[in-house]
């Protein structure tokens, strides 16, 4: 198979020439050359033009576009266009439209208006993919296939009769017998025992709570059914164009698709990410999404397929990115393993639902801040080929599991929780402490990481418990947080004090949950401090937190110690004097258990303690009076320093900045400033010095 990446980072975005008269196309490619664009995605939403009626294909316009791009030196990531069915499909096959849990069949007129289980949709999508592969598989501009677009973004669950039949087939393949399903689902509760698979429906709207395991299995099925759509198109492309890599665009930490099951099937991991500039934690959240993409690809380079140059159009208030913020977030992706930086889209639309979504070429044209920033970024990326392919080395890992996410957010639990907030909280704390973090499903070898964090692994398999235990035995510092090991993969409670096999790892067991006063006030994020929003709290005292008490937020539980040391206890309320934080030596490492949730400052204190215990040396490459979030990531020999904070900082790191060619030490990084620091090159002669000046600094691969 052809390599995905080239000698310099990919740079470009979605190109939708079908929205514009052909007279504009020549201007497009001329401006692409000026901006340094070398890759565009073409045809994502062009199905109705490629196949205006069933079986009649119109490829002439696309021929012209691809030929023009090729002549201009711009490569193409060619989409199969199957994300937005044309009007004729739903008109002729109305059963292809998706149905909600309440039984409402959605109407056409938007995008992703299809049921993933629909035979009519799948037949039509497969035919189009085949026609495209036959026509363009040997086109010199095409370097990658882009299947569909953002699977599950708008319709990730369909409850129609076709989906019900497909769900039953999926269940029969998994359980084989109806008796096995009844046991797994616990159907003796509420008189739900099934006599055959034909009696089973998707978890549609019901009078009370649906069966929890049925709901979890439907989440799994729905992710698998979308994956089946992808794999059907991929099989056609692989048959006809075996040498062209295939991708589809993930969406960061998107809830409704389990990317761990998808990642092995793409030749390169691609991501779409739109952090909100109005969110002060946007850069922290996007750092986690970048780390997830790198982790999904097992450390291989990945592609930032979509981001915005400035404002989007999907929020109640769409704030523009601050000057320099687009560049800073682009380099964040490069630092965390991306070898390509793309945008949605190239030219800002003049019509349609996304006309106020920013683009590389904005409505106001080239005499604009956005265009100047795009040109600057393109020119800089063209000099950074030496960074490509280098690995980003992580010192810590956070276990991130879609089954736990789906299950812990169901109804009928002790308290409402946002799994993403729980996991992101720990990722942000490690990142702010200067560590780079991988993510893992938790059922693989974790022993190479000095620090392992297991946040609320509600659904815990035996394999995950064994991997966590093995990491501690091998020398890792492991922290497990509350609501871990509560149920098995069928949502059956792990009896005898929760935690399952981790009881022996941690030296504790859990008697009872004590949620602190109800549902979250802000389900999207743990607050910076308890005072920043109205949340129930409890005090926690222990030497780990220093002389002052820490504050537990929204959750506590009754912890019994078997053979662990109590490092902090609850103060006040029903659990006064009971353990809140424990530590157990386990093999060559340690296993900690935290029975509450902490705000940012208290989490930082605990993370600092874990770092010290692990023996990690944390790099501090900047100084400043008021340090905000200054991101530091080592990729290969290059140290990326990105100042997401509001005030300037000064670099205290020796080396050469690849972006300016100057000495790094003493450089000032303003807000949104970036430096990429490489070791200085020792020169033996004046000729060497001239060559080094021409090439700036080469980083060993």
Image (spheres, helix red, strand yellow):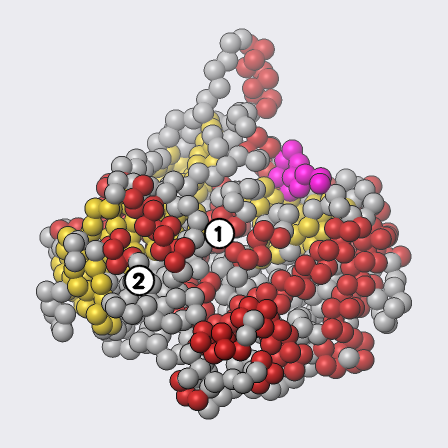
Using residue 377 as the reference point, say whether residue 637 is left or right of it. left
Label annotation for residue 421:
none
Q: Residue at x 58, y 15 (%)?
A: 690
Q: Residue at x 57, y 35 (%)?
A: 388
In the depicted view, which residue is nearer to us: 600 or 113?
113
Q: Is residue 589 magenta?
A: no
Q: In terms of sequence position, does the residue under pointer 1 or pointer 2 come before the other? A: 1
Taking 594 as reference, is 269 above or below it? above
Quarter of the image with the N terminus in it: top right
In the depicted view, which residue is nearer to us: 471 or 592?
471
Q: Secondary structure at mark 2?
A: loop
In the depicted view, which residue is nearer to us: 638 or 471?
471
- Residue 126, image x, y percentages: 77, 63
Q: Is residue 9 magenta?
A: yes
Q: Residue at x 60, y 83 (%)?
A: 198
**Which range is magenta?**
1-10
Label annotation for residue 500:
2
Task: State the CA–CA distance, disc 1 to disc 2.
Answer: 27 Å
Residue where numbered disc 1 is placed: 292
Q: Is residue 46 visible?
A: no
């Amino acid at each position: 198979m052809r390599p995905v990446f080239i000698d310099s980072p990919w740079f470009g975005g979605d190109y939708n020439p079908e929205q514009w008269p052909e007279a504009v196309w020549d201007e497009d490619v001329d401006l692409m050359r000026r901006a340094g664009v070398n890759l565009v995605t073409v045809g994502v939403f062009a199905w109705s033009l490629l196949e205006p009626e069933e079986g009649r294909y119109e490829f002439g316009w696309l021929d012209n576009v691809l030929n023009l791009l090729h002549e201009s030196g711009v490569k193409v990531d060619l989409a199969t266009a199957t994300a937005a069915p044309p009007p004729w499909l739903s008109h002729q096959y109305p059963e292809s439209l998706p149905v909600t849990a309440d039984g409402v069949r959605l109407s056409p007129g938007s995008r992703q208006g299809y049921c993933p289980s629909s035979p009519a949709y799948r037949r039509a999508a497969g035919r189009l993919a085949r026609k495209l592969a036959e026509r363009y598989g040997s086109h010199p501009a095409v370097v990658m296939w882009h299947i569909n677009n953002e699977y599950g973004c708008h319709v990730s669950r369909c409850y129609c009769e076709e989906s019900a039949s497909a769900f039953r087939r999926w269940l029969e393949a998994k359980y084989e017998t109806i008796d096995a399903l009844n046991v797994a689902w616990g159907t003796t509760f509420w008189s739900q025992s099934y006599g055959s698979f034909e009696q089973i429906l998707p978890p549609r709207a019901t009078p009370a709570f649906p069966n929890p395991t049925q709901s979890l299995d439907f989440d799994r099925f729905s992710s698998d059914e979308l994956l089946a759509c992808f794999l059907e198109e991929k099989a056609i492309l692989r048959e006809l164009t075996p040498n062209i890599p295939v991708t589809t665009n993930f969406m960061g930490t998107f809830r409704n698709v389990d990317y761990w099951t998808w990642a092995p099937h793409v030749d390169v991991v691609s991501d779409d990410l739109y952090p909100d500039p109005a969110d002060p934690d946007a850069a922290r959240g996007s750092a986690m999404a970048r780390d997830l993409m790198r982790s999904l690809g097992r450390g291989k380079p990945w592609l930032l397929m979509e981001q915005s140059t400035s404002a989007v159009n999907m929020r109640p208030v769409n704030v523009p990115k601050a000057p320099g913020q687009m560049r800073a977030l682009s380099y964040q992706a490069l630092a965390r393993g991306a070898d390509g930086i793309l945008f949605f889209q190239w030219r800002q639309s003049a019509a349609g639902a996304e006309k106020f979504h920013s683009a590389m070429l904005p409505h106001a044209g080239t005499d604009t801040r956005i265009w100047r920033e795009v040109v600057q970024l393109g020119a800089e990326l063209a000099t950074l080929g030496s960074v490509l392919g280098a690995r980003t080395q992580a010192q810590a890992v956070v276990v991130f599991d879609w089954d736990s996410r789906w299950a812990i957010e169901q109804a009928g639990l002790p308290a409402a929780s946002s799994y993403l907030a729980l996991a992101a909280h720990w990722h942000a704390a490690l990142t702010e402490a200067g560590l780079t973090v991988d993510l893992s499903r938790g059922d693989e070898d974790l022993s190479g990481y000095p620090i392992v964090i297991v946040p609320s692994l509600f659904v815990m398999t035996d394999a995950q418990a064994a991997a966590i235990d093995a990491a501690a035995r091998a020398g890792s510092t492991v922290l497990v947080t509350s609501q871990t090991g509560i149920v098995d993969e069928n949502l059956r409670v792990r009896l005898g004090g929760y935690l399952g096999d981790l009881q022996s790892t941690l030296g504790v067991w859990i008697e009872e949950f004590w949620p602190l006063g109800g549902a979250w006030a802000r389900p999207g994020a743990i607050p910076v401090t308890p005072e920043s929003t109205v949340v129930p709290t409890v005090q926690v005292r222990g030497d780990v937190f220093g002389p002052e008490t820490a504050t537990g937020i929204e959750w506590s539980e009754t912890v019994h110690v078997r053979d662990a040391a109590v490092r902090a206890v609850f103060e006040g309320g029903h659990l006064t004097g009971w353990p809140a934080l424990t530590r157990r030596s386990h093999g060559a490492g340690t296993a900690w258990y935290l029975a509450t949730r902490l705000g940012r400052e208290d989490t930082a204190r605990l993370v600092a303690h874990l770092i010290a215990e692990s023996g990690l040396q944390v790099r501090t490459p900047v100084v400043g009076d008021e340090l905000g979030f200054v991101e530091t990531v080592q990729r290969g020999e290059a140290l990326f320093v990105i100042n997401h904070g509001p005030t300037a900082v000064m670099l205290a790191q020796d080396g050469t900045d690849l972006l300016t060619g100057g000495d790094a030490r003493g450089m000032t990084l303003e807000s949104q400033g970036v430096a990429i620091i490489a070791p200085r090159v020792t020169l033996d002669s004046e000729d060497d010095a001239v060559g080094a000046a021409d090439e700036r600094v080469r980083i060993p691969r």
